[in-house]
Amino acid sequence: MVEPEGVALRLAEWAKRRRASIAWGPAAELCSARRAVLGLREDGLLDAVFFRDQLEPVAGEPDQLPEWARTVIVAAVPSPAFTVAFTTSAGSVTALLPPTYVHYHRTHDAVAGEILAALGPERRVELTRGPVKTLAVRLGLASWGRNNITYSGRLGSYHQLVGVLSDAPLVPARRRGPAATAGLQECDGCSSCASV
């Protein structure tokens, strides 16, 4: 079995080849991210219907993790935006489709397989069920924009976040973000995206 330092090196090499950014921490961070989102709902900061219909089905139980899970890994993989065109009786309209909505499941499955290959065949990997954006911010991989999109270093918003649980005993690669609500400094005092 490869030592944790060797596994971390292989993950870093995978991220470099993939042109991705990656962070990891204790599996319990997933529980903390879930509780943070539930706290927003309890504080009335998330619409109850939106939470019920969109977030609750994917949030997972706040404190449930597989027994074998030791580490949570989140990767921000490059993903371009797509332009779609709609033709109506009034003419053509084009719209920018954010990268997170294109090839969503296919990307997640592919990245989970690639992370497993980097960790080694003796390891276990499972896609996370929970708020991956919040988790990415908590792990220091991304920051929130005022528009609820995460921004990750050199990738900006053109990324797709993929989270996996693993039994690999990795030492956290980054400092944890200051809070689940850490935002971009560039957004302070700006509301351009909110006025569109």
Image (tube, rainbow, N blue to C red):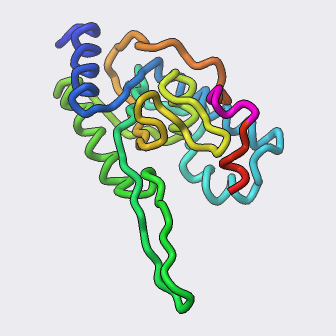
Image point (39%, 59%), residue name: 82
Q: Residue 178 at x, y = what percent?
A: 64, 18
Using the rendered view, name the quadrant where residue 149 is placed: top right
Quarter the N terminus occupies: top left
Q: Position of residue 58 (x, y in %)?
A: 54, 49
1 up-or-down from 166: above or below: above
The quarter of the image holding the C terminus is: bottom right
* Quadrant of the rendered image containing residue 114: top left
Q: Is residue 178 left or right of residue 67?
A: right
Q: Is residue 91 left or right of residue 160?
A: right
Q: Residue at x 41, y 35 (%)?
A: 155
Q: Nearer the viewer, residue 120 or 97?
A: 97
The segment highlighted magenta reads 184-189
How many circles with numbers are drawn on the protein?
0
Q: Is residue 152 left or right of residue 20?
A: right
Q: Nearer the viewer, residue 64 or 10?
A: 10
